[in-house]
Image: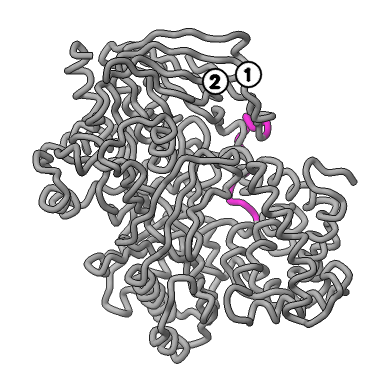
C-alpha cells in the first residue's frame, strides 16, 4: 500500500507499535490494531500529511529511533520492536508504562498516531458499543481542505 | 462576501478603513461591530470556511481539517503542553466547548491595582458583556442536555458538601451532541462563523479565507496597510498576493500568533515585552470508571463546574470527549487498555483548570511554524494541579467511582480512597503530569505606561498609531475562566473606540 507521507518501513513500525498497545483477541473485544491495519494506517497517514513538515519529520524519526531504543533500553534486546511478536510488544509496553519518566511519556507517541485513527473506525466503534448521539447533518457532503 | 482560495484567480488589491487579521473571538467581533457602524472592513483568515456540511464527528478528520497543525500545536517545556487552536473561519470558537464566563471582577480589579490598568472600570464593561452575551445567546442548558457526567459530579460534590453548577453556553437549540470541539453538527453553537461573521458579512465586510497576512506596512509611525498571500488549502502553497491599504489594522490572531507575527515584522516592541508573559491555563483530566452506565457522550462535552477552590487558583470544569481522544487520557496497554475502552460508556471525566502563575514566552516561528512557544510549569502550579486532581478524585469516589485515573505519571490509577490518600501525599514535580492547556493570553499586555506594556487600555499599540490588538494577548494575567466572552467584550469596546476616533487615522 502506498501512503501520502509514510514510507513502508515507517508504516510497518507504527503498525507494530499499535499491535502492541491494541493486541488481537482478549476478553474485552476481539479486534486488534493488526486486524484493521489497512483501514486505520491511511487515516494516520492523512493526519500526518496535515501536520507541518517539521512535526511530521520529528514523529517519523521518533518512530524509527524508538523501534530500536525501546527494546534495547527496556528489554536489553537488540531486536527492533517491529520484529517482536505481538505478545512481546505488549509486554514491552507494559514495562515502559511502569518505568520512571520519561518512559511512560514516550508511549504518548503511539497514542497520538494510533488511537484517533483506530477508534474512529465504524467497526471499532461498534465493538466498544459507542455510537454518536445524532446522525450527520442532512446537508453533509464531507470534510474539505 | 466571503471569498476562499478557489474564488481568487489573480493578485488582489483592496482599500479599506480597517483591515482585521484573524476571524476568531476578537477579529469577528471587531469586524461586525465596525461594519455595522458603516465602516469599510476587510477580514483576513488563514483557514478555510467550514459548516455542518463538513462536520462528521470524527475527531481525526476534524483535527486534520480545522485544527492548526492538525492538533499538534504545543508549548515546549517541562512538561510540554498541548495547546490546540482552530485554523478556520471563526478561529478557535469553532472548536471550543462553548463555555462562557464574564471576566471575574476580582481579575479586573487586580489589573487595575497591580498591572498598570488604572482607567479600566468593571462597571463600564458590563454593558459590553450584555451586548456580547445577547449576540452569542449565552444560555443555561437543562440537566438532561448537560449530561450524566454533570449529574454524577453533582452527586459526588453534594456528598462532600460542595456544589456543582451548570456552565453557561453560547448555543441555540443545543441537543447535547457532545462533539463541540469537532464542529457542532447541529449548528447550535454560536461560534463566530454562525453568529458574528454572517452579520459582518451582511453589513458589507469583505471576508477573505485562506489568506495569510505576511506584513503590516507602516509609514511615519502609522499603519499603512497589510500585505498578504492566498494559500492553497490542499497543498499549503502560496499563490496570489494581496495588498490592502488601510487606516487601521487589527491584529487578532490570538495570543500565540499575534506576538510572533509582530516580532517577525519588528514592530511595537520598545517595551521589550512583546511575546512575554504567556499564560495558558494548564489543565489536567481526571477520568473515573463507574459501575453505572454513564454515556457521557450523550450530553454537552463541558457541562458543569465546581468553583469552591477558586481562591486556590483551581477550577474544576466538565469535559467529556469521544473514545478516539478519551483513549489517550487512559493508562494501560494490551488487555488493560482494551478493557477501559470497552467500558467507555461507564467512564466519567472532569477537568482541572489551573489559574497559572507560570509565565511563558512566544518567539517568531521557524521551520514552517507560525510561532514558537516556551512554557515550563512552575512548582506552585504543579502543586495546584496535583491538588485539583485530588479534589476531583475525592468527588468521583464520593459519587461511587470504582477507579480514578489521574493523568499523573507517578500514580496514574487510584483503586480506592487509600490510594487517593497516598496520591495526595505525593511530592510532585511539574513533569509528572500530562498537561493540556487552553486559553493562551498575555503576550501583548495592556497598560498605561509604554515602558511596561505593548498596548494601551483601548488595545492600541503604544508604538504604532492605528495598530490594535483585540484578541487575548493584552490581558495581563490569567483569567481563571474560559476567556472567549472577555475577548469578545474587549473587542466590542475597542471597536466602539475605533469607530468614534476613525477620523484621527
- Mark 1 nearby-residue class (10 Å; few <14, some 14–19, many ≥20): some
Q: Secondary structure at mark 1?
A: strand
Magenta residues?
Answer: A131-142
Q: Looking at the picture, do discs 2 and 1 lie on one chain?
A: yes
Image spot of residue B419 (x, y percent): 47, 88
Image spot of residue B132 (x, y percent): 27, 34
Q: Are marks 2 and 1 in contact (CB under 8 Å)?
A: yes
Q: Is residue B207 magenta?
A: no
Which chain is indicated by disc 2? Answer: B
For residue B202, above or below residue B108:
above
Q: How far, Cα to Cα, is label 2 from label 1?
A: 7 Å
Q: Is residue A141 magenta?
A: yes
Q: Secondary structure at mark 2?
A: strand
Q: Is residue B196 left or right of residue A126?
A: left
For residue B282, above or below residue B270:
below
Asked whether A26 or B228 is in front, the reply is B228
Q: Residue at x 32, y 44 (%)?
A: B139
Q: Quadrant of the C terminus of chain B?
A: top left
Q: Quadrant of residue B17?
A: top left
Q: Quadrant of residue B317?
A: bottom left
Q: Quadrant of residue B54?
A: top right
Q: Which mark is residue B239?
A: 1
For residue B165, above or below residue B286:
above
Which chain is indicated by disc 1? Answer: B
Residue at the spot of label 2? B229
Answer yes or no: is residue B501 visible: yes
Question: Which SS type dominates the magenta stretch?
Answer: loop
Q: Earlier in the sequence, mark 2 or mark 1?
A: 2
Looking at the image, the residue that sits furthest to the bottom is B418
Amino acid at each position: 500500500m502506498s501512503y501520502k507521507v509514510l514510507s513502508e518501513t515507517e508504516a510497518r513500525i507504527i503498525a507494530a507499535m499499535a499491535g502492541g498497545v491494541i493486541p488481537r483477541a482478549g476478553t474485552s473485544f476481539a479486534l486488534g490494531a493488526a486486524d484493521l491495519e489497512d483501514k486505520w494506517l491511511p487515516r494516520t497517514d492523512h493526519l500526518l500529511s496535515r501536520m507541518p513538515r517539521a512535526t511530521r519529520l520529528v514523529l517519523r524519526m521518533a518512530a524509527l529511533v524508538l523501534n530500536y531504543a525501546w527494546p534495547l533500553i527496556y528489554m536489553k534486546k537488540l531486536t527492533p520492536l517491529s520484529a517482536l511478536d505481538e505478545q512481546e510488544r505488549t509486554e514491552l509496553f507494559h514495562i515502559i508504562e511502569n518505568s520512571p519518566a520519561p518512559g511512560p511519556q514516550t508511549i504518548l507517541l503511539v497514542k497520538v498516531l494510533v488511537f484517533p485513527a483506530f477508534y474512529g473506525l465504524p467497526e471499532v466503534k461498534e465493538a466498544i458499543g459507542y455510537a454518536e448521539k445524532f446522525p450527520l447533518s442532512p446537508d453533509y457532503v464531507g470534510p474539505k481542505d | 462576501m466571503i471569498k476562499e482560495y478557489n474564488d481568487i484567480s489573480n493578485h488582489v488589491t483592496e482599500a479599506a478603513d480597517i483591515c482585521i487579521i484573524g476571524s476568531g473571538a476578537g477579529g469577528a467581533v471587531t469586524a461586525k461591530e465596525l461594519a455595522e457602524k458603516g465602516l469599510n472592513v476587510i477580514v483576513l483568515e488563514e483557514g478555510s470556511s467550514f459548516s455542518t456540511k463538513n462536520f462528521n464527528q470524527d475527531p481525526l478528520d476534524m483535527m486534520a481539517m480545522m485544527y492548526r497543525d492538525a492538533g499538534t500545536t504545543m508549548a515546549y517545556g517541562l512538561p510540554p503542553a498541548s495547546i490546540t487552536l482552530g485554523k478556520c473561519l471563526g478561529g478557535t470558537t469553532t472548536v471550543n466547548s462553548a463555555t462562557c464566563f464574564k471576566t471575574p471582577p476580582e481579575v479586573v480589579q487586580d489589573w487595575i491595582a497591580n498591572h498598570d490598568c488604572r482607567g479600566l472600570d468593571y462597571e463600564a464593561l458590563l454593558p459590553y458583556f450584555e451586548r456580547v452575551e445577547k449576540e452569542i445567546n449565552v444560555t443555561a442548558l437543562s440537566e438532561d442536555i448537560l449530561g450524566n457526567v454533570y449529574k454524577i459530579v453533582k452527586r459526588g460534590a453534594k456528598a462532600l458538601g460542595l456544589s456543582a453548577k451548570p456552565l453557561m453556553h453560547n448555543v441555540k437549540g443545543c441537543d447535547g451532541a457532545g462533539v463541540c470541539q469537532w464542529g457542532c453538527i447541529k449548528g447550535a453553537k454560536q461560534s463566530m462563523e454562525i453568529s458574528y461573521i454572517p452579520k459582518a458579512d451582511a453589513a458589507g465586510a469583505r471576508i477573505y479565507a485562506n489568506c495569510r497576512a505576511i506584513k503590516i506596512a507602516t509609514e511615519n509611525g502609522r499603519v499603512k496597510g497589510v500585505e498578504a498571500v492566498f494559500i492553497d488549502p490542499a497543498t499549503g502553497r502560496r499563490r496570489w498576493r494581496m495588498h490592502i491599504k488601510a487606516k487601521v489594522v487589527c491584529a487578532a490572531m490570538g495570543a500565540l500568533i499575534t506576538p510572533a507575527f509582530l516580532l517577525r515584522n519588528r514592530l511595537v516592541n520598545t517595551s521589550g515585552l512583546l511575546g512575554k508573559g504567556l499564560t495558558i491555563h494548564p489543565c489536567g483530566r481526571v477520568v473515573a470508571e463507574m459501575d453505572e452506565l454513564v454515556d457521557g457522550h450523550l450530553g454537552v462535552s463541558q457541562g458543569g463546574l465546581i468553583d469552591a477552590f477558586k481562591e486556590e487558583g483551581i477550577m474544576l470544569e466538565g469535559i467529556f470527549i469521544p473514545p478516539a481522544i478519551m483513549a489517550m487520557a487512559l493508562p494501560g496497554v494490551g488487555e488493560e487498555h482494551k478493557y477501559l475502552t470497552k467500558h467507555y460508556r461507564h467512564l466519567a471525566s472532569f477537568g482541572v483548570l489551573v489559574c497559572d502563575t507560570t509565565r511563558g514566552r512566544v518567539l517568531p516561528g521557524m521551520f514552517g511554524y507560525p510561532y514558537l512557544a516556551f512554557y515550563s510549569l512552575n512548582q506552585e502550579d504543579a502543586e495546584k494541579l496535583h491538588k485539583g486532581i485530588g479534589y476531583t478524585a475525592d468527588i468521583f469516589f464520593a459519587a461511587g467511582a470504582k477507579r480514578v485515573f489521574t493523568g499523573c505519571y507517578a500514580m496514574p490509577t487510584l483503586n480506592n480512597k487509600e490510594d487517593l490518600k497516598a496520591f495526595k501525599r505525593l511530592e510532585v514535580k511539574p513533569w509528572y503530569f500530562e498537561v493540556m492547556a487552553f486559553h493562551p493570553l498575555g503576550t501583548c499586555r495592556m497598560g498605561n505606561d509604554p515602558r511596561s506594556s505593548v498596548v494601551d487600555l483601548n488595545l492600541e499599540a503604544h508604538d504604532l498609531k492605528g495598530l490594535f490588538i483585540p484578541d487575548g494577548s493584552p490581558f495581563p494575567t490569567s483569567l481563571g475562566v474560559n476567556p472567549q466572552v472577555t475577548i469578545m467584550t474587549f473587542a466590542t469596546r475597542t471597536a466602539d473606540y475605533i469607530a468614534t476616533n476613525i477620523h484621527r487615522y
